Image: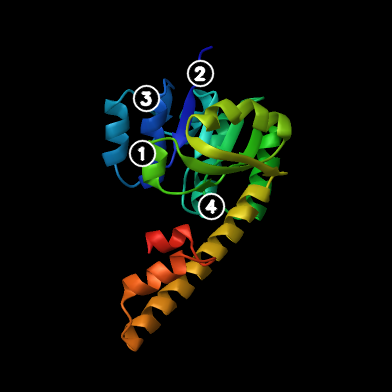
Amino acid sequence: MSKPSIGFIGLGLMGSAIVNRMIKQGYSLNVIANRSRTNVDIAVAAGATEYKSSRELTAASDIVMFCMDTSDSVESRVYGENGVLAGAKSGQLIIDTGTSLPGSTKKISADLAIKGARYMDSPLGRTPSHAVDGLLNIMTAGDKADFDEILPVLQDIGENIFHVGPLGAGHTLKLINNFYAMTTACAMSEAFAMADLAGLPRDTLHQVMSAGPLKSGMMDII
């Protein structure tokens, strides 16, 4: 079966890694530039098509995916005469893979529904290096039928894919996940700082903590 064309907005570190992965997986990618041309030029050189507006990109795509930093950034691309909303089509799937506010997600969904388009939140876990190899964690929320439809696409970029509930649940869960991750990182940083003050080697502390229930993937990142 032919793969859907993907309009991708947000080619930062994570977004560009996903785009290049999808091109290699045989998808037709439509992209748009924002602050920097570097990653867009790389994507175009690999076979992506560049569009000048979000409206044109959306009209030319089967599925539209966002990978932006904040809800403000997402809304700036959705609204306006050249925005995604203006180009949205009935039945089209539009997916936000960034870390957005659940309230904004629900507002955008309601506005897109007027055009007959469907909206999902599908934030990502792990890093751009995982995206290169299609090993992201993906927490998708929205209608279950829409999830089943988009699942083959998500399986090409992710390793652990979850349907976490109704619209907004994905972004809510991602914010909780980030809170827990940062709390863990702060606690471990304090532990290593105390080891330094006490004259204990960091490697020794790491070995002891890694041998027990404190072992954490975050420990290896820090």
Q: Which of these two is toward me, 103 or 158?
A: 158
Q: Is residue 39 left or right of residue 100?
A: left
For label 1, the SS is loop
Q: Compare marks 1 and 2 and give the one earlier in the sequence.
A: 2
Q: In which image quadrant can residue 86 be found? A: top right
Q: Which residue is mark 1?
A: 33
Q: The residue under label 4 is which amino acid type?
A: Thr
Check disc 3: other Cα within 10 Å, few if <14, some if 14-19, many if 20+: few
| Residue 136 visible in the displayed image | yes
How crowded pointer 1 is (Cα within 10 Å; few <14, some 14-19, many 20+) is rated as: some
Q: Residue at x 47, y 47 (%)?
A: 68
For badge 2, the amino acid type reads: Lys
Of circles 3 and 4, the one toward us is 3
- Along the horizontal axis of the image, is 41 left or right of 67? left
Point out residue 123 in the picture as x, y percentages from the top left corner: 55, 46
Label 2: few (<14), some or many (≥20) within 10 Å? few
Q: To which residue does mark 3 refer?
A: 24
Disc 4 to disc 2, C-alpha distance: 26 Å
Residue 187 percent coordinates (x, y):
48, 74
**Quarter of the picture holding the N terminus:** top right
> How far apart, in angstroms, are the residues tagged by discs 1 and 4?
20 Å
Q: Position of residue 177 (x, y in %)?
A: 57, 58
Badge 4: few (under 14), some or many (20 or more) residues near its Cα, within 10 Å? many
**Cα distance, mark 3 to mark 4?**
25 Å
Q: Which residue is found at the position 32% from the left and 31% from the top?
A: 43
Residue that lies at the very extreme toward the bottom in this rendered image = 198
- The amino acid at mark 3 is Lys
Residue highlighted by disc 4: 99
Task: Please tell me whether mark 3 sits on a helix, a strand or a loop.
Answer: helix
Residue depth check, mark 3 versus mark 1: number of the one nearer the observer: 3
Q: Dots 1 and 2: beta carbons under 8 Å? A: no
Q: Is residue 32 above or below residue 27?
A: below
